[in-house]
Amino acid sequence: MVYTANLGFPRIGSGRELKKATESYWSGDLTEAQLIEEAKGLRAHNWQLQKQSGLDIIPSNDFSLYDQVLDTSVMVGAIPDIYGWNGGPVSLETYFAMARGTRGRAGGDLPALEMTKWFDTNYHYLVPEFTQDQSFALASTKPVDEFLEAQALGIRTRPVLLGPVSYLLLGKTVGAEFDPLALLPSLLPVYAEVLQRLASAGAQWVQLDEPCLALDLGPEAQDALKQAYGALAEASGGLDIMLTSYFGGLGESLETVLDLPVSGLHLDLVRAAEQLDEVLAAAPSELTLSLGVVDGRNVWRSDLETILDRIAPAVKARDTDRLVIAPSCSLLHVPIDLDMEEELDPDLRSWLAFAVQKVEEVTILGRALNEGRDAVADSLEASAQAVKARRSSSKIHDAAVETRLQSVTRDMARRSSEHSIRRERQQRSLNLPAFPTTTIGSFPQTSDIRKARAAHAKGHLSHDDYQAFLRREMEAAVRRQEEIGLDMLVHGEFERNDMVQYFGEQLSGFAFTRHGWVQSFGTRYVRPPVLYGDVSRPQPMTVEMTAYAQSLTDRPVKGMLTGPVTLLQWSFVRDDQSRAETCRQIALALRDEVADLEQAGIRAIQIDEPAVREGLPLRRAAWRAYLDWAVECFRLAASGVSDETQIHTHMCYSEFNDIMDAIAAMDADVISIETARSKMELLEAFTSFRYPNEIGPGVYDIHAPRCPEVQEMTDLLRKASERLDARQIWVNPDCGLKTRSWDEVRPALANMVEAAREVRTHAA
């Protein structure tokens, strides 16, 4: 028979139970024991749900209280010295200190680990830190504990571990430059011990995820894979290893992978369908192949008949006992259950599948292969009809949008003057001091704001009363910023639920769920919009609020927009046309908004693009094409203004070194970036490249619940001044402040302004 499997299930709970429990634990309203019990209940629910669906192979250890990479660091004892770990089990206090930092702790505040994007997704992981003399030791038996937990419920799972090679490649070295793969010999004994314990506990298979296989790997990494899996196969205690790749094809690693002593290999046949023929031709007959044919990254319903036809050669060529049908990757990246979305447009709803429905699709495919297509004829017909209806729907296509796209010229994506000329004109217009201070855009979304938004959404608060409430909040925020001494203000974004959702709700072609939450990091969940059709802007989106804020002060107030690439990247995007074409549609809609903001007297407009680096293809050969259209779309949105209007952008938690030419080509007047967690390390890319425009290197980490001292931020600004011309430097936090409280924000920003004054005085 052909087996069916899942690689990972969303851990957050359909009602965001994990978020609520974790934040209650942080606030002291929930004990550690209660948090652990809540997590146990979520795991049990997920296992039972998947078992009831008919899946043959159910994952365990896909659950995390915060992040699976952090879990791996804890498992292998890779705990930086600053967290005071002295061996033995890692406490929950230490775990969350690594994740979030600490405030007010004896001995001083502790910073969080650096955070960055998980490959080309909007999920963020905590970056492991390695020293040259790094030692590893088993410090958590979580994979074994959760396997036994499921087994006690009568469910034998396939435990999931992040593979050792990917784990090392995802980390950063501290104290000295060296190849982290050099640590592999000392890491492997810990992995071997975990595998042996799993085998002793009764596990038959283990899933070792090596997403690095989707990257361009050099000889050193290829050798590391051989070393790692040779050692683990020998020390596994008879456990079968399913080597799991996803987010792309195996590429140049195919030959290496097929020679590894593993029992199974998972292929992403959504991102890289073309690799199936090559693998079938070269794979040993005894190798179990797991075919990732249901899209684990997007929400569109599968075309089941087409999938069955596509994998028919594999079914014909292989022993079916050595075939597994699965999603392309973990379902961590999609919402949990479409059945909760009763208010969605019925047509759109019929085109979608969330995690629960994707598991059902896997089991339908398994039944079709094992029992024949007639056994699931109704399901196959429903799939075919949904695909056909979506393809022909009038809700998708807008002739006016197509006509406008055809009218775009190259000059529309260019500012009228070079930055050096614009800088002089903007300085005369804005009259800002050296080291000007600002924030990234959002201010605390207090409980009163959330209650008012909810009351308005439910019809309990009238439109006029809600607008009056928002104006009072904006005026209070403007006055606070003036009192703190910020040079360029923002309106606070109190009317906005999310930086993508707020705009998507006002653009045609986007639809929104009520319960479609997806984890971005920790307890930060987002509801990505479903971008299903042609995009246009029916009316202005931000002008009224921004203009009102500007009317309250003589200081410049930035208009705040989310950029076209980020709106694309952080949505579930239609797959019936190129991403480039969809992005150009969004760019034209934003171009209209930028023009209207300028017309309303807004002299600085920030177009955030934190997802530009995230969208970079994993294979270098595809970079140029992507960067060309991504840069073009940003410039298309930003370039319809006069020289006097200052265009800002913001990027966070990304590695910029390889794309500096593209960032420079975006030609934003000011770019703000995250640099506090890395202590200005991320600024190195801009200084090595000699970035010509202005830069706001973040001087404090807003995700950590701590107030940085003036001296700490002054030191960071002095580091920046050693690398940049003082005229280039802006002073700002790492990111928006919506998740913090005013009690945290006011003293931190006051310290930031004082730090700017100190370096300003010193520079003078």
Image (cartoon, rainbow, N blue to C red):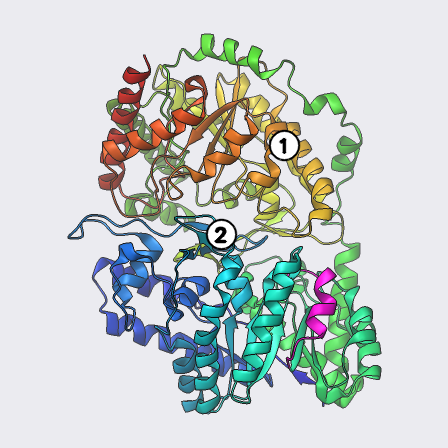
The part of the chain drawn in magenta is 247-262
Q: Is residue 176 magenta?
A: no
Spot occupied by residue 69 in the image (x, y as percentages of width and height) = 45, 63
Instruction: Name the secondary structure under disc 1.
Output: helix
Residue at position x 63%, y 77% in the image: 360
- Amino acid on which the number 1 mark rests in the picture: Asp
Q: Which residue is mark 2?
A: 178
Residue 685 visible to the viewer:
yes
Callouts 2 and 1 close, C-beta under 8 Å: no
Residue wearing tag 1: 661
Q: Relative to the observer, which residue lies in front, 189 or 751? A: 189
Determine which quarter of the picture holds residue 291: bottom right
Task: Name above or below for residue 688 compared with residue 269.
Answer: above
| Mark 2 element type | loop
Residue 397 placement (x, y as % from top left): 75, 45
Asked if the magenta segment contains residue 257, the reply would be yes
Would you place residue 611 above or below residue 715 in this image?
A: below
Crowd rating for badge 1 (residues with CA inside 10 Å; few <14, some 14–19, many 20+)? some
Q: Nearer the viewer, mark 2 or mark 1?
A: 2
